Amino acid sequence: MSATQVAKVKAGSEGKTADKVFKGIAYACGMLILVVLAAILVFLFIQALPVFTGDQANVSQKVSDYSNGTTKNFWVLVGILVFGTVLVSVLALLLAIFVSIGIALFISHYAPKKLSTALSYVVDLLAAIPSVIYGLWGGLVLIPSIQPVWNWFAKYLGWTYIFQGPAVQPSKTVATVAVVLAVMICPIITSVSRDIFKQTPRLQQEAALALGATKWEMIKLAVLPFGKSGVISAAMLGLGRALGETMAILMILSPGYLFSVFLLKGSQNMTIAANIALKYMEADDMGVSVLIGTGLVLFIVTFIVNFVARKITDKAVK
């Protein structure tokens, strides 16, 4: 066997070893995620166990305290908090998704290169801003500024029930929180959507233009179908952040424990994460268990949302 052949055999052997090492590392990292996820689930379950096995009279009292006397049933409290969490998050997503897609398309296909680069930096910077900053902005700037808008909604759209007035002043309401969350998740959805749109094959775009399509028709025929699964993933990523948001909601929303869809009235709804932050400092052992029990439900809800999002994304790809 020649020296060249020996070198090739040796290189092939080293390559196979490197492949095995990389496969092992990748496998270990994947399993680590599952282990951490399982550890979190087990921790939450153990900490929440006294809610189901402990003194039920004490549990009922804590639930009553944490719901401002609305209910003494733990599951009713969970239902109220899940309803408020989903309501605020879905409203924020509806406000953000179309604006985000428009910004992403402008950056990827309409803006000049220098402007596109600058806007990309701005969007990425906005996505990294801590939620407490958005909360401060919402409390100090948005609440006073948006009051005339909510008054207009209550006056002319009050017949729609959800905008039934009068709009509370100051507007520490679900509607205002939804706007703040929409501003918060908009950069996340925009950033991911922009990167997906930029990956649209150039040949598909040029083929559409060559057949006589306008730029918008090219985007509708080539860019949006290609990026559909990515946009769905981006939307679910934004929804995940909205579901778990704490400080911004805590700093703006006037807490209430009702199954209510009155968006312009105060003290109607509360989210799980914000409620935990609000009540945790004054909680005793049983109180902590009640709060962690609601956190366990939030964990499950978030997992279900991500699971459904994955199924939708897989279906969109096919």
Image: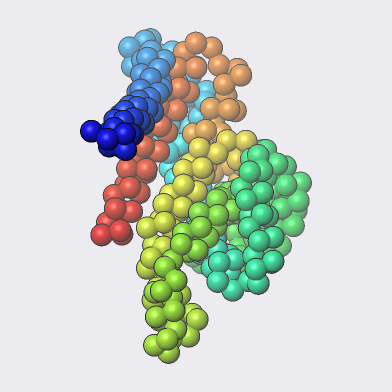
- Residue 138's place in the image compared with 318, above or below, is above
- Determine which quarter of the picture holds residue 99: bottom right
Residue 166 appears in the figure: no
- Determine which quarter of the picture holds residue 211: bottom left
Residue extending furthest toward the front: 2
Residue extending furthest toward the left: 1
Q: Which residue corresponds to the image point at 39% horizontal and 62% vertical from the top-left?
A: 228
Residue nearer the viewer, 254 or 40: 40
Residue extending furthest toward the bottom: 212
Q: Which residue corresponds to the image point at 45% horizontal and 17% vertical from the top-left?
A: 289
- Residue 205's place in the image compared with 103, above or below, is below
- Residue 265's place in the image compared with 15, above or below, is below
Task: Report whether 196 appears left or right of 7.
Answer: right
Q: Which residue corresponds to the image point at 29% horizontal and 53% vertical from the top-left?
A: 314
- Residue 219's place in the image compared with 192, above or below, is below
Image quarter in which the N terminus is found? top left
